[in-house]
């Protein structure tokens, strides 16, 4: 435990109020966040919850101790979009019998999951404590952790699910307060499933827990769908695959238990995904809640428009880091991180070049000031922790960091040390160390070479410093007109 007295307050979507956070067990604070569906590279909309909940994870570790927080973020690697991508990328190999569909799907998801991990590392995010893959939690497991088939069977036995036309569906009418999270009247709700509403449903809003797979589709040996399988003329035992929502219910319970502290994700997941997670989990386990606090980050636009491929403004994290498609240049991961955090997590964000430029300039100033620290690392200042404890209020925290930067640049080494601690706490790189005396000596030697018109020698010094992460900037003294050179650490 950190021993600090801060009270963490979080806006709970379930109650629509800001509440004091009280964990079920202060020695094991538990948080689950919906991760990516890895059919393609993660886009910047995916980046926002990863960054937001990384900050919350860091804050929880600060307040309760790193050994007393468990963070789970899943990877969805079973999905109809993934199936379609596998057919697109490996269709010829599948048709020729050189590759099975399941193997093709694995190739797609391994590639995209690996890229996701590289991307979020570049964004300064800590890895979660556990990162389960959906495909590993479909069938009963040797370790006894919760699986999807057993959860569905429990729902059937408790009268909350039924089999029809080869599918298993959740019976929304069996749950009197279904819709409590989204607060949508039952008659206004959509089915929230991956297939069209069909006549075999008792109610239009009933959603799929288990789907029948054809012999050509990926699937697992299924306890359901025998009649539909035989009716279709398929030989052998029926195969099926899980619906979207049941995956997170199984994986969260597997690592965090039937009831845990925090469930997070994007605003777009409130309905139907999170609503249906709650329904499944509560009804399968017989609990009053699934998680005590539900947190959701706001929507993201690009340059004032909804992000979409049809508008040509669909941006992946990888593109921003490695190409020059946005603003004509590549963007460092920590600049993307700060740009995301400059808007409060619950507010909509307009992701624009000007916002990235603002973040880069701010971060450059902070880094320049933090590099002036020459004393032992300080504790993260209360002026940073306190606003973050108020529903992750990053704006006042960043104001405090800018004030520390101003003081550091005026010669306050304690402020520089505090700023360095704050940057490190928030996931920004502070590892670059510079021998200030050596840099100043190199600059003096370069100015002497310039005076002697030895341009090649001057360029060599400049390039050597740049290779060490030191960026030189030439200018003129406003009073004398003489050449002067300033420098900064290039991150």
Image (spheres, rainbow, N blue to C red):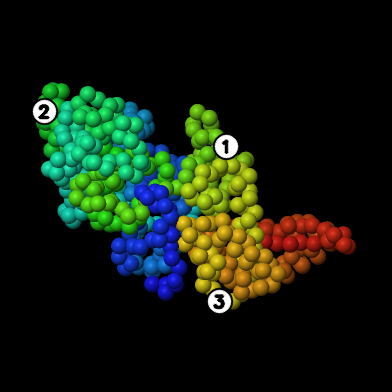
Question: Which of pointers 1 and 2 lies earlier in the amino acid sequence?
Answer: 2
- Residue found 50% across the figure and 65% down from its top: 385
Name the residue beneath numbered marker 1: 304
Which residue is nearer to you in this view: 253 or 489?
Answer: 253
Does residue 46 appear in the picture of this structure?
A: yes
Please tell me whether mark 2 or mark 3 is closer to you in this view: 2
Q: Position of residue 341 (x, y in %)?
A: 53, 52
Counting other residues with Cα less than 10 Å from the Cα at mark 1, is it few (<14), some (14-19), or many (20 or more)? few
- Return the residue found at the far bottom: 375
Quarter holding residue 410: bottom right
Question: Which of pointers 2 and 3 lies earlier in the amino acid sequence?
Answer: 2
235 relative to 34, above or below? above
Name the residue beneath numbered marker 3: 376
Tell me the SS state at disc 3.
loop
Would you say 231 lies left or right of 402 here?
A: left
Counting other residues with Cα less than 10 Å from the Cα at mark 2, is it few (<14), some (14-19), or many (20 or more)? few
Tell me the SS state at disc 1.
loop
- Residue found 55% across the figure and 76% down from its top: 376
Does residue 235 appear in the picture of this structure?
A: no
Q: Position of residue 15 (x, y in %)?
A: 37, 50
Counting other residues with Cα less than 10 Å from the Cα at mark 3, is it few (<14), some (14-19), or many (20 or more)? few
Please tell me whether mark 1 or mark 3 is closer to you in this view: 1
Tell me the SS state at disc 2.
helix
- Tell me how far mark 1 sits from mark 2, CA to CA: 51 Å
- Tell me how far mark 2 sits from mark 3, CA to CA: 71 Å
Name the residue beneath numbered marker 2: 227
């Amino acid at each position: 435990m950190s021993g600090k007295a801060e009270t963490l307050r979080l806006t709970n979507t379930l109650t629509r109020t800001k509440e004091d956070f009280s964990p079920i067990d202060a020695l094991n604070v538990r948080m689950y966040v919906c991760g990516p569906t890895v059919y393609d590279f993660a886009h910047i909309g995916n980046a926002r919850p990863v960054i937001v909940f990384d900050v919350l994870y860091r804050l929880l570790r600060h307040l309760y101790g790193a050994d007393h927080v468990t963070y789970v973020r899943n990877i969805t690697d079973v999905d109809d979009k993934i199936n379609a991508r596998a057919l697109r990328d490996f269709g010829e190999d599948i048709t020729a019998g050189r590759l099975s569909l399941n193997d093709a799907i694995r190739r797609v998801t391994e590639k995209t999951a690996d890229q996701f991990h590289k991307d979020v590392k570049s964004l300064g995010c800590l890895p979660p404590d556990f990162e389960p893959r959906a495909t590993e939690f479909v069938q009963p497991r040797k370790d006894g952790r919760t699986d999807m088939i057993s959860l569905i069977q429990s729902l059937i036995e408790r009268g909350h699910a039924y089999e029809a036309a080869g599918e298993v569906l959740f019976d929304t009418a069996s749950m009197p307060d279904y819709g409590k999270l989204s607060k949508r009247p039952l008659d206004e709700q959509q089915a929230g499933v991956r297939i069209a509403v069909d006549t075999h449903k008792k109610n239009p809003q009933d959603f799929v827990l288990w789907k029948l797979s054809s012999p050509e589709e990926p699937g697992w040996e299924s306890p359901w769908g025998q009649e539909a399988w035989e009716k279709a003329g398929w030989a052998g035992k029926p195969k099926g695959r899980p619906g979207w929502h049941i995956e997170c219910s199984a994986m969260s319970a597997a690592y965090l238990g039937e009831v845990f502290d925090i469930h997070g994700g994007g605003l777009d997941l409130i309905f139907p995904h999170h609503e249906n997670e709650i329904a499944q989990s509560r009804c399968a386990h017989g609990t009053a809640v699934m998680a005590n606090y539900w947190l959701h980050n706001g929507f993201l636009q690009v340059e004032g428009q909804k992000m979409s491929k049809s508008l040509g403004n669909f941006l992946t994290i990888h593109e921003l880091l490695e190409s020059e498609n946005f603003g004509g240049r590549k963007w460092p991961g920590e600049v993307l991180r700060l740009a995301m955090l400059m808007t409060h997590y619950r507010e909509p964000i307009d992701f624009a070049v000007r916002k990235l430029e603002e973040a880069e300039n701010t971060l450059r100033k902070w880094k320049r000031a933090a590099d002036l620290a020459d004393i032992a690392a300080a504790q993260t200042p209360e002026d940073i922790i306190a606003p973050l404890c108020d529903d992750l209020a990053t704006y006042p925290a960043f104001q405090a960091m800018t004030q520390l930067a101003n003081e550091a640049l005026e010669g306050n080494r304690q402020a520089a040390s505090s700023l360095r601690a704050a940057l490190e706490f928030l996931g920004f790189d502070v590892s670059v160390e510079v021998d200030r005396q050596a840099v100043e000596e190199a600059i003096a030697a370069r100015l002497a070479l310039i005076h002697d018109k030895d341009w090649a020698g001057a360029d060599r010094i400049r390039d050597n410093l740049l290779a060490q992460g030191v960026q030189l900037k030439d200018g003129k003294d406003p009073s004398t007109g003489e050449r002067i050179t300033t420098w900064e650490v290039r991150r």
